[in-house]
Image (cartoon, helix red, strand yellow):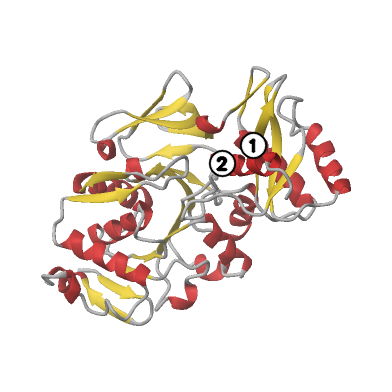
């Protein structure tokens, strides 16, 4: 049976954990970080055979809600990942995400089902200092991956077998850094709480890096009348699940993610997908040494209904630099997709996992613009 390592401090076998009758009797529970306690308690519940788990959704597009996730769904999801990545009992995995969310819980399930040793660390931007050894498989959020590459840990990471990245879209810059520095299989994931973590992977590292997500297992996909992805498989209990993700389906097993339907801007009757514009703007902003967060949003417009604007987090840049950015953007974007102005917010609205909430950030901007100076 697998061994569970609590950072570089303690360890317990899965067999030992399974024999404990009450959660309060779990060893080391009062000696480690709270994030490790959450993961350890979930591992105990899984090993004790719990058949159903209450799970809070991320709340990235609205208020978080609680759903029930069944053991069979989690087992099916874990087995798809284990098979896709070729994981086995000789591998070990790293959980450096919060087990409060489905992504963290599923790292525990994959490890226990695959009989892999599991290292649990607190969810910091760089978890490597807390490791007793380098695991062969890990799941990171983009911020962690960015930090690890900036801190020149490529040699350590390249000793691994596979890395998956989820929780938020991977930026163009991060994709370029992964392609240039990592030789092991690195994948961006597509999924959500309702699909019990990811149902598709997109390879970011060479060889065969791709813009398309590859659907796992026997999962079926199609689009609805809006062009949004629908998913059916064991993880959805055989029922079609309709998402708000705009996609372009290449074939039965591959799709291109375009953006969120609920963030589409209608400007003068033209539907504008913010994520597509952001991909164009990212290298332009990077060229001007801007490294902060930004997003495409909109403001009400009496003529066009909505007008596209660029929303930047943090302090304002110079008006000269604004003109340079918008002029360069105009060479690549049509008039309807070109931001009409640049606005600033001290901080974007975000979820507890630091996902940017577009709607709430837009509301903060409108409030800022319509509140009289005091």
Indicate whether 119 appears above or below 47.
below
Q: In the depicted view, which residue is nearer to us: 102 or 215?
A: 102
- Identify the secondary structure beneath mark 2: helix
Which quadrant of the rendered structure holds the N terminus? bottom left
Rendered location of residue 207, percent (x, y):
55, 49
Rendered location of residue 61, percent (x, y):
47, 40
The residue that appears at 46% across and 50% down in the rendered structure is 167
Rendered location of residue 200, percent (x, y):
41, 41
Residue 241: name its quadrant.
Answer: top left
> Could you tell me how far apart the alpha carbons at marks 2 and 1 are, in whole angstroms?
7 Å
Q: In the depicted view, which residue is nearer to us: 242 or 372?
A: 372
Of mark 2 and mark 1, the one earlier in the sequence is 1
Which residue is denoted by mark 2 in the rendering? 358
Badge 1 density bin: few <14, some 14–19, many ≥20, Cα 10 Å = many
Which residue in the rendered view is the most extreme toward the front?
A: 374
Residue 192: name its quadrant.
Answer: top left
Which residue is denoted by mark 1 in the rendering? 297
**Left or right: residue 206 compared with residue 82:** right
Q: Is residue 119 visible?
A: no
Q: Is residue 285 visible?
A: yes
Badge 2 density bin: few <14, some 14–19, many ≥20, Cα 10 Å = many
**Left or right: residue 200 compared with residue 46:** right
- Identify the secondary structure beneath mark 1: strand
Q: Which dot marks residue 268? A: none
The residue that appears at 23% across and 35% down in the rendered structure is 237
**Left or right: residue 146 compared with residue 70:** right
The residue that appears at 52% across and 69% down in the rendered structure is 126
């Amino acid at each position: 049976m697998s061994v569970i390592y609590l950072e570089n401090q303690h360890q317990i076998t899965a067999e030992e954990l399974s024999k404990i009758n009450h959660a309060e009797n779990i060893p080391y529970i009062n000696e480690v970080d709270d994030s490790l306690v959450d993961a350890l308690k979930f591992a105990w519940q899984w090993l004790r055979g719990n058949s159903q788990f209450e799970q809070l959704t991320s709340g990235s597009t609205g208020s978080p809600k609680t759903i029930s996730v069944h053991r069979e769904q989690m087992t099916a999801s874990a087995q798809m990942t284990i098979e896709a990545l070729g994981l086995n009992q000789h591998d070990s995995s790293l959980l450096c995400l919060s087990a409060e969310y489905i992504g963290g819980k599923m790292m525990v399930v994959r490890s226990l089902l695959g009989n892999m040793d599991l290292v649990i660390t607190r969810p910091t931007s760089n978890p490597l200092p807390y490791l007793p050894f380098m695991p062969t498989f890990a799941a990171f959020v983009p911020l962690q991956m960015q930090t690890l590459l900036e801190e020149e840990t490529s040699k350590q990471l390249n000793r691994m077998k596979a890395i998956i990245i989820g929780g938020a879209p991977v930026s163009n810059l991060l994709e370029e850094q992964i392609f240039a520095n990592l030789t092991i299989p690195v994948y961006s994931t597509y999924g959500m709480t309702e699909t019990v973590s990811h149902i598709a992977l997109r390879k970011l590292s060479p060889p065969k890096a791709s813009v398309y997500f590859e659907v796992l297992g026997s999962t079926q996909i199609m689009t609805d009348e809006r062009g949004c992805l629908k998913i059916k498989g064991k993880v959805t209990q055989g029922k079609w699940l309709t998402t708000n993700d705009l996609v372009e389906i290449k074939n039965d097993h591959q799709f291109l993610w375009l953006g969120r339907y609920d963030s589409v801007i209608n400007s003068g009757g033209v539907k504008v997908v913010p994520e597509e514009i952001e991909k164009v703007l990212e290298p332009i902003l990077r060229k001007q040494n801007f490294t902060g967060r930004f997003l495409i949003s909109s403001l009400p417009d009496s003529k066009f209904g909505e007008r596209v604007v660029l929303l930047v987090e943090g302090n304002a840049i110079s008006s000269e630099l604004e003109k340079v950015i918008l002029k360069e953007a105009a060479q690549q974007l049509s008039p309807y997709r070109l931001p009409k102005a640049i606005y600033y917010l001290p901080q974007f609205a975000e979820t507890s996992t630091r996902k940017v909430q577009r709607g709430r950030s837009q509301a903060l901007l409108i409030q800022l613009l319509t509140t009289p100076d005091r």
